[in-house]
Image (cartoon, helix red, strand yellow):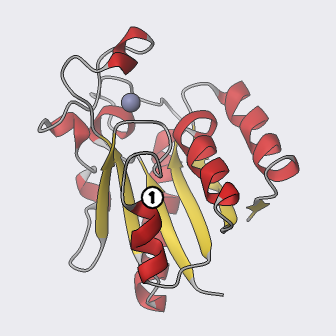
């Protein structure tokens, strides 16, 4: 087993109270878990890959959600508490799935990664669709239960069940 830690959308607009689409009161505890997981992965030599929502100013996604994570703005940057370090990988994305239109898959394959451990937000959106693509591509997926959250906690719980029962991810 060769594992990578995938940190999903821990960016200013979702993870900071002043962000455009702050996840809410569940976020501080998730930041602590992310911090712990990132430190563990770096110690263990597991590649740390940050996925960051990164939209055009007039992105089609803004028909569904208020504008957020606009390319080149603070809103699209990883929060300072979880800042990427030398050797970490940052992959911007325009869609929910970190695999769609990005080089995430080849980045992982070049490192012979077969297992993804996932933290971040939102459980029912970018975590879920990234994990679904990972499973379709043959990766094993571990979701850190206390390390993911959403602005919608009911959808968060539904997504955890879907991740485990339908997608075959392991909740850890
Ligand atoms: Zn977005």
- Residue 25 visible from this viewpoint: yes
Ligand 1 is located in which of the four quadrants?
top left
| Mark 1 Cα-neighbour bin, 10 Å: few <14, some 14–19, many ≥20 | many
Query: Looking at this view, is 101 or 126 the one in front?
Result: 101
Decide: is 75 above or below 48. Answer: above
Mark 1, ligand 1, within 8 Å: the answer is no
Does residue 36 show up? no
Tell me what residue is drawn at x 22 percent, y 16 percent. Answer: 58
The answer to which of 127 and 85 lies nearer the viewer is 127
Residue occupying the point 48% across, 41% down: 27
Above or below for 40 versus 64:
below
Helix, strand or loop under label 1: strand
Q: Is residue 163 left or right of residue 111?
A: right
Residue 107 vs 130, above or below: the answer is below
Is 68 on the left or on the right of 96, as rendered? left
In the displayed orientation, state which residue is furthest to the top.
63
Picture coordinates of residue 77 (x, y %)? 22, 46
- Front residue of 153/32: it is 153
> Total number of numbered labels?
1
Work out which residue is located at the far right of the displayed protein and give it.
Answer: 165
User: Pointer 1: what residue?
Assistant: 7
Q: Quadrant of the N terminus?
A: bottom right
Q: Position of residue 127 (x, y in %)?
A: 57, 46
Residue 106: percent from left, percent from top = 42, 70
Q: Quadrant of the C terminus?
A: bottom right
Q: Is residue 97 left or right of residue 49?
A: right
Examine the image and state in which quarter residue 82 appears: bottom left
Q: Residue at x 76, y 48 (%)?
A: 163
Residue drawn at the location 59% of the way across and 68% of the way down: 116
Q: Position of residue 65 (x, y in %)?
A: 42, 15
């Amino acid at each position: 087993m060769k594992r990578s830690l995938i940190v999903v959308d821990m960016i200013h607009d979702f993870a900071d109270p002043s962000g455009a689409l702050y996840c809410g009161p569940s976020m501080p505890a998730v930041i602590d878990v992310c911090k712990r997981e990132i430190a563990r992965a770096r110690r263990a030599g597991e590649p740390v890959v940050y996925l960051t929502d990164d939209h055009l100013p007039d992105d089609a996604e803004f028909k569904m959600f208020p504008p957020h994570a606009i390319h080149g703005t603070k809103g699209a940057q990883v929060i300072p508490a979880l800042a990427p370090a030398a050797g970490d990988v940052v992959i911007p994305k325009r869609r929910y799935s970190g695999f769609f239109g990005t080089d995430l898959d080849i980045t992982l394959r070049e490192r012979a990664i077969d297992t993804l451990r996932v933290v971040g937000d939102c459980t029912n959106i970018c975590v879920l669709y990234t994990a679904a693509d990972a499973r379709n591509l043959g990766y094993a997926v571990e979701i850190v239960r206390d390390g993911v959250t959403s602005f919608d906690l009911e959808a968060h719980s539904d997504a955890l069940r879907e991740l485990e029962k339908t997608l075959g991810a392991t909740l850890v």
